[in-house]
Image (cartoon, rainbow, N blue to C red):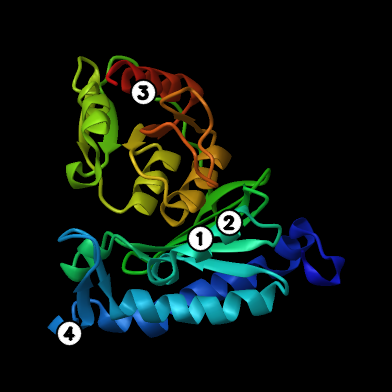
Amino acid sequence: MIEHNETIEEFLAGRAIDVEEAVRKAAAQEIMPRWRRLADHEVDRKSGPHDLVTDADRQAELYLTEVLPTLLPGSVVVGEEAVHANPASYEAIRGEAPVWIVDPVDGTRQFVHGDDGFCTLVALALGGVVHASWTFAPAREQLATAVRGQGAFLDGARLHAGSPETGRDLRVATSHPDFTTDGQKRSLLALGTDGVAPRACGSAGLEYLAIARGESDAIAFTWEAAWDHAAGLLLVEEAGGAHLTRAGERFRITGGNDLPFTAARDEATARRVAGLLSGGA
């Protein structure tokens, strides 16, 4: 429960700028000083060679975990690195308290390699519904924000996803094969058809931003971790886009989705991609 009987809407009306400041400070203090300066001992592997974690991830998440609940008393944080250490902490997403869903460095592989294609993702959710999101790409100095029912913005300019151009192949970013089951691989292979141009994805957060900007048409992802998707899904929705699972249902950040799922620039594109994913099962 939120303390002091403040609603999420009231909080966002008065304190959203403070969340933005916290996200920027986390990047300025903990992420950017380590970009292109990482020592070997500051990089570790988690589940495999493509699943990396750095001191920047850990320290930025610690900063946000300390600051965000002070902005909204009664809220809790679910962060990628904390869940890796204690998987049971993920259950807070299904709880009654407002939850900050945090990916401190989304696109850690890119970050480690010195590329600028990484971002910090923060979403505020309650009861499985994402109410606001912040996507900050510090190396590019880009901040995308969304508040449910109020639109999506990039550096203050409203985002409109639009629709794909008629006659052009759909540009679809897909999960890395290392993170897919055999069944999911078959679903993704169904995208290799006329009129679709699949490619491997980069940072999930930046792929969602590309859809919201109309620079990419859709994604097809095979994992549910809320820190990768919550911020971007709201951004795409508020820019006019849509998301569907392989079963034709909206993706739920609380889990239990029929994977793969898609997010796309418009409803028609989402249905087309979801239909292909379903047919490839």
**Is label 1 in contact with label 3 (beta carbons under 8 Å)?**
no
Q: Amino acid at mark 2?
A: Ile
Circle 4 or circle 3, nearest the eye: 4
Give percent across and percent down for residue 254.
Answer: 55, 47
Disc with the residue nearer the chain's start (3 vs 2):
2
Q: Nearer the viewer, residue 255 or 60?
A: 255
Residue identified by numbered label 3? 273
Residue identified by numbered label 2? 93
Distance CA(mark 4)–CA(mark 2): 32 Å
Residue identified by numbered label 1? 90
Eyeballing the image, is 172 above or below 132?
above
Circle 4 or circle 2, nearest the eye: 2
Disc with the residue nearer the chain's start (4 vs 1):
4
Circle 4 or circle 1, nearest the eye: 1
| SS label for mark 1 | helix
Q: Amino acid at mark 3?
A: Val
The residue shown at (33%, 64%) is 140
Q: Is residue 279 left or right of residue 8?
A: left
Residue identified by numbered label 4? 41
The residue shown at (18%, 60%) is 48
Q: Quadrant of the C terminus?
A: top left
Within-10-Å neighbours for mark 4: few <14, some 14–19, many 20+? few
Distance CA(mark 1)–CA(mark 3): 29 Å
**Is label 1 in contact with label 2 (beta carbons under 8 Å)?**
yes
Q: Is residue 257 left or right of residue 170?
A: right
On residue 198, the disc is none
Q: Quadrant of residue 199?
A: top left
